[in-house]
């Protein structure tokens, strides 16, 4: 790992020793991820920092971690509550090759793969039965434990990079009332202090392995793992359309990561927008 260029990231400080040790243990599995870590005390959004570094030429796999975010965000511009010491707030720079880009939206595929990664890593590190909810939530006991936000940058129509950001709730916190009943943390579920270094290292290692699957064209391995970790079969969903609320039952995802919903006798393909699980 390299030291942080403080003139570019003034809120940076040294990566904690336990994280350095944990990352060294998984270096081969994570390759090329995790070689460079920028550990920030506070930032608006790790995704924004990662995008800025990627535009400046930062290497693939560069990882940004913050102790707290003042403007963390999720899908559709929602804020991501990021209290100090209560979670992992991380973004990773990826530069997908043609083998990924030609298959489907790399953002969709990387979002699905990241859901698999975090669910598998949480299971491996804590024993918790983490599950996935389309498109970007990781749940334990039906409550949200982690979220993912993948964002891409294009230049001249060509993909330059993708930033995969994720937040994992580690410790119990005073969550805002509007979300308190819908979220959980590793500490709340295990009743013991979480090992932040182990969990982060396991996520980065598994992300390296799943990213290798994508680069090798093993898309079915990702989709198969996603289906095993998700609870889709017949789950009721609804969304807003120009003609009103549409209701149906989720059946599957397709090869490109779109949600397939049965509405009457017809199968609808949902690729974007807001789907509510009811």
Image (cartoon, rainbow, N blue to C red):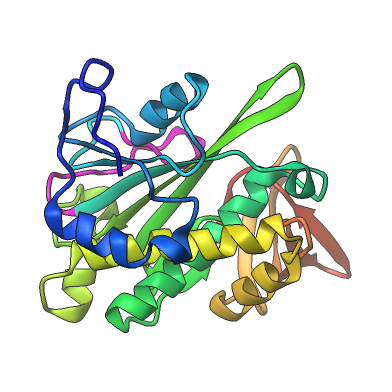
Q: Is residue 114 above or below residue 68?
A: below
Q: Position of residue 67 (x, y in %)?
A: 18, 42
Q: Is residue 84 magenta?
A: yes
Q: Is residue 100 above or below residue 45?
A: below
- Which of the 4 quarters of the picture holds residue 11? top left
Q: Position of residue 224 (x, y in %)?
A: 68, 76
Q: Main secondary structure of the magenta part?
A: loop
Position of 21 with respect to 34 (left or right) is left
Looking at the figure, which quarter contains the N terminus? top left
Position of 173 with respect to 156 (left or right) is left
Q: Position of residue 35 (x, y in %)?
A: 38, 47
Position of 59 with respect to 249 (left or right) is left
Q: Is residue 185 visible?
A: no
Q: Is residue 64 visible?
A: yes
Depth order, front residue of 61/124? 61
Position of 149 with respect to 87 (left or right) is right
Residue at 21% across, 56% down: 19
Residue at 24% across, 29% down: 43
Q: Is residue 120 above or below residue 87?
A: below
Q: What's drawn in magenta, residue-wise?
A: 72-86
Depth order, front residue of 178/198? 198
Q: Is residue 44 magenta?
A: no
Q: Is residue 208 above or below residue 190?
A: above
Residue furthest out toward the right: 265
């Amino acid at each position: 790992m390299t030291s942080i260029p403080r003139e570019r990231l003034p809120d940076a400080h040294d990566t904690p020793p336990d994280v350095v040790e944990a990352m060294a243990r998984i270096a081969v599995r994570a390759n090329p991820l995790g070689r460079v870590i920028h550990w920030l005390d506070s930032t608006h959004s790790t995704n924004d920092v990662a995008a800025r570094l990627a535009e400046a030429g930062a290497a693939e796999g560069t990882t940004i971690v913050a102790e707290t975010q003042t403007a963390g965000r999720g899908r559709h511009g929602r804020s991501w509550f990021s209290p100090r010491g209560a979670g992992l707030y991380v973004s990773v720079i990826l530069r997908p090759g043609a083998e990924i880009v030609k298959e489907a939206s790399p953002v969709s595929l990387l979002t699905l793969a990241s859901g698999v990664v975090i669910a598998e890593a949480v299971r491996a590190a804590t024993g918790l039965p983490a599950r996935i909810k389309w498109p970007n939530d990781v749940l334990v006991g039906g409550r949200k434990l982690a979220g993912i936000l993948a964002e891409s940058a294009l230049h001249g129509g060509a993909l330059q990079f993708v930033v995969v950001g994720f937040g994992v709730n580690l410790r119990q916190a005073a969550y805002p009332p509007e979300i308190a009943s819908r979220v959980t943390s590793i500490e709340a579920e295990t009743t013991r202090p979480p090992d932040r270094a182990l969990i982060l290292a396991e996520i980065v290692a598994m992300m390296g392995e799943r990213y290798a699957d994508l680069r090798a064209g093993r898309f079915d391995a990702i989709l198969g793992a996603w289906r095993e970790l998700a609870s889709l079969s017949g789950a009721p969903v609804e969304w807003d359309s120009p003609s009103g609320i549409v209701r149906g039952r989720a059946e599957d995802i397709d090869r490109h990561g779109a949600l397939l919903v049965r509405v009457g006798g017809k199968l609808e393909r949902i690729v974007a927008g807001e789907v509510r699980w009811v």
